[in-house]
Image (spheres, rainbow, N blue to C red):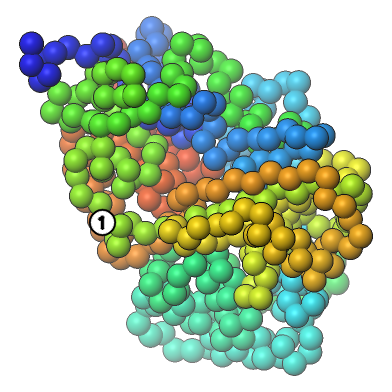
Amino acid sequence: MSPAARAPDRAVDFLIIGAGITGLGFANGIRAEAAARGAPPPSVLILEAAAEPGGYCRTVVQDGFVWDYSGHFFHFADPSIEAWLRERMPDQDVRTVARRAKVRFAGRDIDAPFQAHIHQLPQADFIECLVDLYEASQAPPGPPPRTFKELALQTLGRGIAERFVLPYNSKLYTCELEQLDAEAMGRFFPRVDLDAAIASMRPGARRADYNSTFTYPAGGAVEYVRALLRDLPPELLALGERATSIDRARKVVTTSRREVGYRHLISTIPLPSLAKACGLPAPAATFSANKVVVYNLGFDRKGAEDVHWMYFPDPARVFYRVGWYDNILDTPRMSLYVEIAAHRDANIDRERTLERVLADLRAERIVDKHQLVSWHHVELDPAYVHLTAAARAAAAALRGELERAEVHSIGRYGAWTYCSIEDNLLEARALAARLASSVLPE
């Protein structure tokens, strides 16, 4: 029998590639659609290349410290999603925290978001930022900004843009900001108008942002993954099984172990990787991204207690952000995550970079006479995708072509976009609702 005629080892209604938040969210969503119709649950299989589920939303418990692969703090706009998740972790201490975030600027700590607290800057910097913001607000309408840099300069003024937004995001994305289009960050772009900046100057004023409060479980972000797994039968999950190629004509995925047929394929892996598995082009020059190196560091005693995370626009510092788990979990020893952005092809020397991290932490007075007692290192690749007009168009065309073959590419990397974890869950739910009628009886 020829390979084209051979039946797959197994066939399912919904085959999901990736057991991260988005993949698990879809599995829950499609089963909820079946329950709402009074129908038996459809057949589902989730392929996960790693030995454990969660994707980037994983937690390390080491020497009494609780660390994530990166700082995953949940900011829920939809209370029904938060309530649904909390119901599935009844024994977990899920904390709702009022964010305390800072920007380290010229040795001074400015409340975040920077653009709303320019009055905390040294007087000369404050005046320049305020005047430039005023002039930006009064400028006559012109052509819409084409690039991220143009957007920052036009909406915030040169003072704010050059002191924080541009240097910080240059570190974050590790590329020239003229390369990114104006919508590279979407609704997460740090906007502020003149009235809001002035209102923030009042004593006791507190600006409400999308992440002014966040939730975090005492057991780490993995508790949200466990909540998503709670209602899923264990046999739906195939760990350590990588999808290696996809035959769209036969609707068959070849894995490291077998062939699996499907009616609908839901992929949450990076879109260029999915394209390669399908034999489709996805040029690296178009689909570019950086990687992020995370150092989780545990020390023998406390440090600063009035901050949850801090941004570092200074190019002299190797890291762009540092966060304090101990101030979220009220633990007695300083527990940090330190994030460093790098080009995807950069070779990171783990030990030497750790030395640089510790030296920069000492230079910024975050570490004094602290002793490092435990540490963990992970590389996230890809991390931040570079959204350009070419990348948007290519991603839309590629996803459209795949969709016509019942291959649905979703999630932050599947859609090749910038979004929140909650956005991933909403997208997964919406897709489940749309596909339900093709498989489930009405």
Placement of the C terminus among the 4 image quadrants: top left
User: Of residues 42 and 142, which is closer to you in this image?
Assistant: 42
User: Of residues 147 and 172, which is closer to you in this image?
Assistant: 172
Q: Which residue is mark 1?
A: 283
- When asked about the image quadrant of residue 86, the answer is top right
Q: Residue at the spot x=22%, y=14% of the render?
A: 8
In the rendered view, tell whether residue 442 sits above or below residue 28: above
- Amino acid found under the numbered disc labelled 1: Pro
Q: Percent x, y for residue 262?
A: 26, 20
In the rendered view, tell whether residue 291 sits above or below residue 151: above
Placement of the N terminus among the 4 image quadrants: top left
Q: Residue at the spot x=33%, y=19% of the render?
A: 257
Describe residue 408's horizontal placement relative to residue 36 as left or right.
Answer: left
Describe residue 247's horizontal placement relative to residue 136 as left or right.
Answer: left
User: Of residues 394 and 182, which is closer to you in this image?
Assistant: 394
User: Of residues 187 and 249, which is closer to you in this image?
Assistant: 249
In the rendered view, tell whether residue 18 sits above or below residue 420: above
Would you say residue 250 is visible in this rendering? yes
Q: Is disc 1 surrounded by few (<14), some (14 to 19) or many (20+) residues within 10 Å? A: few
Q: Percent x, y for residue 330?
A: 87, 42
Describe residue 317's horizontal placement relative to residue 347 as left or right.
Answer: right
Q: Residue at the spot x=79%, y=86% of the render?
A: 122
